[in-house]
Image (cartoon, rainbow, N blue to C red):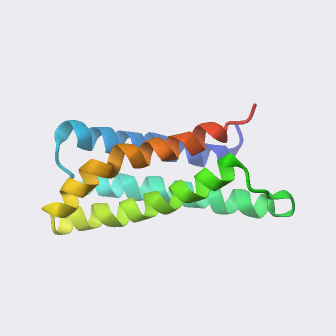
């Protein structure tokens, strides 16, 4: 496994832990938002570095399309998590409602990017 690929594995572990911990604990804690942020940072870093490395041969595939969409969704989801912790109420309810579907889309992008 290359070091760039490890960034996506770190993102997978952190995203998964936060989404499922929140689902089971039924509350979003500040430490969860920190971990989510670290996962997002790993995801963005890996994406940017791989895009730079593959600039000459970059094409739109199901993986690149779902990857960019899911990265955007996770970024919005992170902002939503910040609001959920700061404000609570409806923000946390919506975070809870959309966490697993957002994670599933991200997981699809992750799986389609696994080298064969």
Q: Residue 98: x percent and y percent?
A: 32, 51
Image point (19%, 68%), residue name:
86
On the question of residue 107 being in view, the answer is yes
Q: Quadrant of residue 57?
A: bottom right
**Vertical position of residue 112 compared to residue 41: above or below:** above
Q: Residue 7: x percent and y percent?
A: 58, 48
On the question of residue 4 being in view, the answer is no
Q: Residue 113: x percent and y percent?
A: 67, 42
Image point (69%, 60%), residue name:
49
Position of residue 52 in the picture relative to residue 13 (left or right): right
**Residue nearer the viewer, 8 or 19:** 19
Name the quadrant of the C terminus. Answer: top right
Hey, which residue is sitting farthest top in the picture?
116
Hey, which residue is sitting farthest right in the picture?
56
Image point (24%, 56%), residue name:
94
Q: Residue 12: x percent and y percent?
A: 49, 42
**Vertical position of residue 111 compared to residue 84: above or below:** above
Q: Quadrant of residue 82?
A: bottom left
Name the quadrant of the N terminus. Answer: top right
**Vertical position of residue 1 compared to residue 99: above or below:** above
**Residue nearer the viewer, 111 or 13:** 111
Q: Quadrant of residue 9?
A: top right
Position of residue 57 in the picture relative to residue 79 (left or right): right
């Amino acid at each position: 496994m290359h070091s760039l690929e490890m960034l996506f594995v770190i993102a997978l572990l952190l995203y998964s832990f936060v989404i499922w911990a929140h689902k089971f604990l039924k509350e979003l804690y500040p430490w969860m938002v920190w971990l989510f942020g670290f996962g997002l940072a790993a995801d963005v870093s890996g994406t940017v570095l791989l895009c730079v490395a593959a600039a000459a041969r970059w094409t739109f595939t199901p993986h690149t399309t779902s990857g960019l969409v899911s990265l955007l969704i996770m970024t919005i989801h992170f902002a939503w998590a910040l609001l959920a912790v700061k404000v609570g109420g409806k923000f946390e309810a919506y975070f809870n409602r959309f966490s697993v579907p957002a994670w599933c889309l991200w997981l699809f992008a992750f799986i389609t990017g696994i080298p064969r």
